[in-house]
Image (cartoon, rainbow, N blue to C red):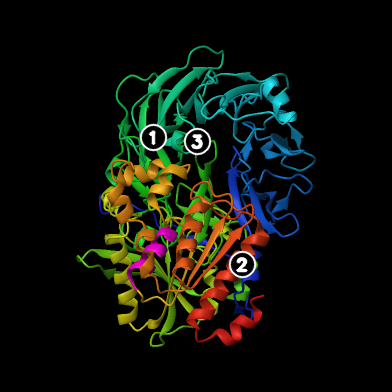
Amino acid sequence: MSSKGKVKGWLVAVVLIAPASVQAGPVTVDDLMRLSTISDVRLSPDGKQIAYVVSTPSFETAAHEAALFRVPATGGAPVRLTYGTRIFNKPLPSPWLRWSPDGSLISFVAFVGTVPQVMAMAPTGGEPRAITAIDGGVTRYEWSPDGQQIAFLASDPVPPDDALRMKNKSYVEHVDHGERPPRLWLQSIAGGAARALTPAVQTILDFHWAPDGRSLAYGASEQLGFQAPYSSSVYTVSVGGGQPRSIVHRPGTNRMPQYSPDGRSIAFISTGGRPGMIDAIDLYVVAADGRGAPRGLTTARELWINSFAWAPDGRALYYISDEQTNGTGEHMFEQGIFRVSLDGEHFQLLTPGRVVNYSLSLSADGKTMAYRSVESRTMGDVFLMNLADGHARRLTDTNPQLRELRLGDLAPVSWKSFDGKTIWGLLLTPPGYSRGQRLALVVYCHGGPIGGYTYGIFPQFAHIPGQVDPYPVEAMAAAGMAILFPMPRGGSGYGVEGFRAIVNSWGEDDYKDIMAGVDAMVAQGIADADRLGVMGASYGGYMTNWIVTQTPRFKAASTAASVSDLANLYYFSEGGDFVAEYFGYPWESAASLVAHSPITHVRNITTPLLIQHGENDNRVPLSQARELYKAMKTLHKTVEFDIYPRGGHVNFEPPLEREYMLRNLDWFVRWLKPTVVSDSRKAQR
């Protein structure tokens, strides 16, 4: 329950499929690579059918391949609808699943040749047909209310002169010139040329049709790339063309507009006029004509909303908060679906318990809601809820093989930090573990810093195919290790004040929070103080690097996509402004950036360190890893360094994902020597 207001929750009765009686076996990396993920869920307008997409890692294509399914709302066997069609999956499946307003078609984004286009097909099956034929492709679109047009995002075509220069290899990129950001376009379903509605200088982020079909609301930025969502405004534009009208123009995030059912209001997400990224992103409502000040609905709760929908009667909105979750304490690992009244005074939690939810959609009459729900020891399934009584049913069984595996136990834990603050985390213990046996313990530091963990088989990646996680925690638990997932200040679960607690102080109080958690696990008889490991990627990699420069207590460490030099990160990362927001610019705050950079303290490292990095990581460039490796080799430290070809900030290719996981499993088994390794390791490859 939120500490900032009482939540009036509905008790939800959930009907589950009874698990079969089987002989369970230990989890291996290959077991994890066989798991599938639901990427999108969409309820038909009449509420009678649910379309959804399932993605599965493929070693043959080195990609996460996706297929479209349909299941009746009354239950029954799902029907697969696509086979030869390749649903868009670069870098991961993103089908952007939709129903036509009359329910006669299911649409999605799929490849036509090598280019993503909007496709549509009958819900009974058959061959899908392409609706768009845009040179650069389409990845986001919406049906008009009458079903006669679609609006979509696409960049302007490459100018003929540039195309010729590319062909003859004389093209030169002039930085900050000639950019072609995505624009908003209209096209008739019957065919014909698409027509641009928005200026070429705006980066269009998202959009929504007015109920009468005469205009669209959209979120846009004057900036490009990583920074665009954090400096955005809300506009409306007539489908007939003309100058867009500014509805919300103020600093910070203002985007994802949605018209109310009567067209009089627009809901959107916003930082409330505050610039930057270290803030809550709450739900607001403003008059559709732009008159009057926006009104915050969830600001007292300091949420981070990335999914919401109007109730068809216009009297409430449904939302999912995907960073600042259900509340504080043991509830910070949950991601519930809430209903908030239009006055912002009444909240209902529709999905209580240890669940994480995504991809909500409502029937046209507002009586039912479909969504993907991830329970503690699952990968997630399609659920349907009767909103009148809160009764929910699971309609799919996407990964039945999980019932044949001996999974570890995942539960919330808490401890007191150095200043008395209560810090929370999750603890994964090996299957069959009972208190009293000391285990090798690996601390898994999360990314962000504004990040955290949820329930699920991959606690940091329940929202996307979890195999992008380099750390196979379930296989590590099967090999006899406990995994601690700490949520220190600076990350999610402690409000905006918690976000800002590490401004100009990465590696200070957050480091102490994590080490207090390690001490608590040792004091409780769970962790063996002589067999401690630490790992993490992105900001978790920064924290891993920092930890091994501050203490010799860990016998092994693995760092991925990691930060070692903060000034270097500002200059070379696509998100370098993030560093400046925490510390200031390098020419103003050089001393602080140096003091808080792990590379500054590299001489202190005694822990064997495995460094892993994608060669094409634009978020944390490869230079960060090379710098740390060079210094450690020069100092004769124990270090190994793996570079993953074609890899970005995470790996998206299943063969490399498998190698990443196996490498980390081997690394910690080698150095920590978990006590039950002899039986479980035989089956890992």
Q: Looking at the rendering, which quadrant does residue 33 occupy?
A: bottom right
Q: Which mark is residue 225?
A: 3
Is disc 2 placed on a helix, strand or loop? helix
Magenta residue check for 381: no
Question: Distance of mark 2 from mark 1, alpha carbons?
Answer: 37 Å
Left or right for 332, reference 389: left
Q: What whole-number distance in Å separates the C-alpha atoms at marks 3 and 1? A: 14 Å
Nearer to the camera, 58 or 300:
58
Residue bearing mark 1 = 253
Please tell me whether residue 542 belongs to the stretch shown in magenta. Answer: yes
Kindly identify the residue that appears in the image at 72 percent across and 28 percent down: 133
Q: Amino acid at mark 2?
A: Leu
Residue 131 visible in image? no
Answer with mark 3 or mark 2, whichever residue precedes in sequence: 2
Question: In which quadrant will I find the C terminus?
Answer: bottom right
Residue type at mark 1 is Thr
Q: Residues within 10 Å of mark 3 (few under 14, many from 20)?
A: few
**Image location (x, y in percent) of residue 292:** 30, 21
Residue range (magenta) = 540-551
Tell me where residue 659 appears, x and y as whole percent.
63, 66
Mark 3 or 2, closer to the camera: 3
